[in-house]
Image (cartoon, coloured by chain):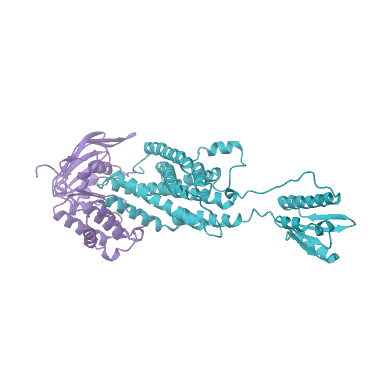
Amino acid sequence: MPENAIRAEGLRKRYGETQAVDGVSFEVEHGEFYGILGPNGAGKTTTMEIVEGLREPDEGTAQILGLPSWPRDRGLLRRIGVQLQASAFFERLTAREQIHTFAALYDIPASRADNMLETVGLTDKAGTREDKLSGGQAQRLSIACALVHDPELVFLDEPTTGLDPQARRNLWDLLRKINSEGRTVVLTTHYMDEAETLCDRVAVMDNGKVLRVGPPQDLVQELGVSTLEDVFLQLTGREYRE
Amino acid sequence: MRPFLSLSAAMTRGLLRDRSAVFFILIFPLMFLVLFGALFKDTSTDQAKIVQVGDVKVLDGIPAKEREELREVLKIEKTDGSAEARDEALTKVRKGDTDAAVFERGGRIELRYSAADEVRAGNVRGVLNSIVQQANQRVTGQPPAFRLKTATLADQSTKPIQFLTPGLLGWAVAMGGVFGSAFNLVSWRKKRILRRLWLAPVSPAAVVGARVGVNLATAFAQTAIFLGIASLPYYGLELTGHWWLSLPLVACGTLAFMSIGLLVGSWAKTEEAANGLAQIIVLPMAFLSGAFFPLDGTPSWVRAISDFMPLKHLSEAMQDVLSRGESWGAALPTMGGLLLFAAVLTALASRIFRWDAA
């Protein structure tokens, strides 16, 4: 395929006094597992939102799968899956009802939704309401809801935040599986070990700019340190954020 | 069509599983109807009850024909003339078991009544007075020069249930409309479902349509239950010919109230703020719109304010078609006004609408 999965050029977005995104450009190839890293307030979320098509950039363009993500294009939205940071569930519905509702929004057969529930290991929790699911179960359900329509490109926003080590490892396996099936995955995370094991390439952001892009191992060697966490701290400093 | 149906199903399930929402939208107004309907059922008794102690010439001497006519307004219970009987009768008056006690002492007719209920007191005084006047007139042996003939009209709209039902139903529909859309909007924004829907290939019409559809279904369910209960023989609501016009009226009202909810939900950041603001709007509106009691006796400025309330116009038009036998003439202008109101507020809400809390 000639086009990149994502092509962002010169994105800028300002909220009042804050320049949230200040000239961000990056490309993600088809089938790639791409990580966007950065401390709180670095501009990761806004960058993701612009690329997904939730917000219009003040400047610059974002193309996904060869098409502009703004203005809203329903044909394009069919081909991407988005898992939002907070668990975006319909109130008081069970896990099965949630994923069936999302399946209907994409006009996907209900059987496929049930299969997806099985893939993320929630079949025995199908009758449980969203507010009664544990943190890990809710994360898995939201990923299942993002994948129910078999998208080519998947956005995951801090999918493992607040999970215990078991749930995290299981989720990693799931994410690797999604990627190995040929989907492009874009992930934001605060866990450097996660980015190191999962991502083909990472972009480190701070102050609304991309500081460095490359495979985790290359960055480690380039800066002469031992882990991606060292890379991160060396690039973004050690002061408290937010 | 499938997104619309599945979103409607999701909203309906969410609503039915929210016990407090079901209570406030359906049970709570219904409690008012059941309670007020029962309380105000018998306010129109105008028959006075008196106890006659011993012989009273004017009462005993009423001709049979007049006695027959009097029976509708006066019920006389006669006891013997002993002192105990008189004490007993006075105690009954004090307790409110009877309206008055009457006895004759030395040629004078004495009437003892309680002043607790001025209407009843006046009533019994008036009746007794006219009996005495007539007796006096009979003694003269002349035919009376003037006769007053009175009759009450059976005015259906004065029966409390006839205005309670449209008023309380309007209030119920207002609560359902305002709270339904305000809560839905705030909660979906907070839980980021709005953004999730933006990122799904679903048309805004399907989302808005589902919400409107669920609210209309709720309003029609409220209407069916209200009219069903008020029509029970116990409450005795009598529907007039064009009562079914209340359905399009309720539909237009729902849209008007949903637009209020939309405005509230666009402004409020949390469910608590939405709840507070919605209460501040709905409750005074219900009082000022005559949902609980008629506005006839209120100062003119109250009525001037109430003219701006969609609920007032809805209640009035509903009363017109439900129990005053009116038709399109009463319903159409109100429907138009409600839709206009909805359009203006929706336009206003769209200007302050936000996709997310940030």
Image coords of residue B79 (percent x, y)? 80, 65
Residue found 28% across the figure and 66% down from its top? A124
The answer to which of B34 and A116 lies nearer the viewer is B34
Tell whether B100 sits left or right of B210: right
The tint of chain A in the picture is: purple
Quarter assignment of residue B110: bottom right
Quarter of the image with the C terminus of chain B in it? top left
Does residue B93 appear in this view? yes
The answer to which of A130 and B295 lies nearer the viewer is B295
Image coords of residue B317 (percent x, y)? 50, 43
Tell whether A143 sits left or right of B328: left
Quarter assignment of residue B41: bottom right
Tell whether B236 sits left or right of B49: left
Does residue B192 appear in this view? no
Residue found 36% across the figure and 49% down from its top? B213
The tint of chain B in the picture is: cyan
Quarter assignment of residue B38: bottom right
Residue A241 lies, with reference to residue A14, above or below; the image says: below
Tell whether A180 sits left or right of A13: left
Image coords of residue A6 (percent x, y)? 17, 43
Image coords of residue B133 (percent x, y)? 81, 49
The answer to which of B290 and B329 lies nearer the viewer is B329
